[in-house]
Amino acid sequence: MLSADTHAEFDPGDRTALLKIAQRSISHGLEKGIPLPVDPNGFSEKLRLERASFVTLNRLGNLRGCIGHLKAIQPLVSDVAENAFSAAFRDPRFTPLKNSELEGLELHISVLSPAIPIEFKSQADLLEKLRPGVDGLILKMGRQQGTFLPSVWDSLPDARSFLQHLKLKAGLAQDYWSDDISFFRYQTESFASSFDNTPV
């Protein structure tokens, strides 16, 4: 799935490679307790570039883990392997994934574009500039920070509600506002499969 107005950057082969790496990293984690070591040199040029990604795990229609990076810090294929492991075993909202949960598990990978600051004069102005279904949003206020991927618009389609829930995620009151608060937008290219690599 693409954010609206975004062209597909990754061909089916690259998408499949990333989904398989995510699956292998989770399997490796179940066996060894550590992320899968990845040599980026064995992959296409696009997968060797430094890119930020998130890996989301759903099971039987419910969130089971979601971990990622907002900034590019390593080759994409390495980032996906690390985030898949972390989503399965290090998301503090959930207990570590068990072998018995692999059935019905879905892997969702989101590759992020660079985040761009949003200029706004007020909260009302910000709300008018948000693009439901298109933008992921990052909130920063001092040490407080939170993000919602574009896919969150599916469950929070109203811009005001989207913003209120993002504030709560960042540890702020939903009606909080400050002249020092900042927001950044980004888009994603997302794709998914079941744990056994069946497309979803």
Image: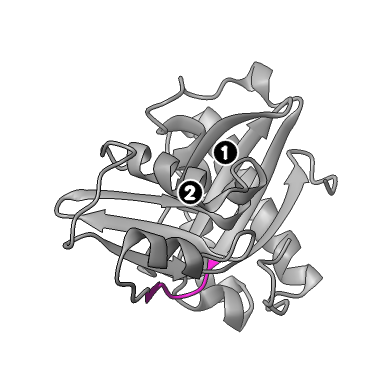
Q: Residue under circle 2?
A: 160
Q: Position of residue 109 (x, y in %)?
A: 62, 54
Q: Which residue is mark 1?
A: 26
Tag 2 secondary structure: helix
- Looking at the picture, tell me which residue is in the foreground, 29 or 154: 154
Residue drawn 61% across and 65% down?
134
Q: Residues within 10 Å of mark 1 (few under 14, many from 20)?
A: many
Residue type (three-letter) at the residue carrying disc 1: Ile
Q: Colour mode?
A: one colour
Furthest residue to the bottom? 45
Pointer 2 with pointer 1, Cβ within 8 A:
no
Q: Quadrant of the N terminus?
A: bottom right
SS class, disc 1: helix
Q: Residue at x 47, y 71 (%)?
A: 51
Q: Position of residue 166 (x, y in %)?
A: 40, 45
- CA distance separating discs 2 and 1: 36 Å
Q: Taking 30 as reference, is 75 left or right?
A: left
Q: Is residue 3 positioned above or below 139 on the image?
A: below
Q: Residues within 10 Å of mark 2 (few under 14, many from 20)?
A: some
Q: Considering only order in the chain, which callout, 1 or 2, is on the residue closer to the N terminus?
A: 1
| Residue in the image at 69% along x and 52% along y | 20
Specify whether residue 185 is painted magenta. no
* Pick the front one: 148 or 176: 176
Q: Which mark is residue 120?
A: none
Q: Position of residue 92 (x, y in %)?
A: 37, 28
Q: Nearer the viewer, mark 2 or mark 1?
A: 2
Place residue 99 in its image quadrant: top right
Q: Which residues are magenta?
A: 112-117
Q: What amino acid is at disc 2?
A: Arg
Identity of the residue drawn at 55% across and 69% down:
187
At which x and y percent is residue 141?
20, 54
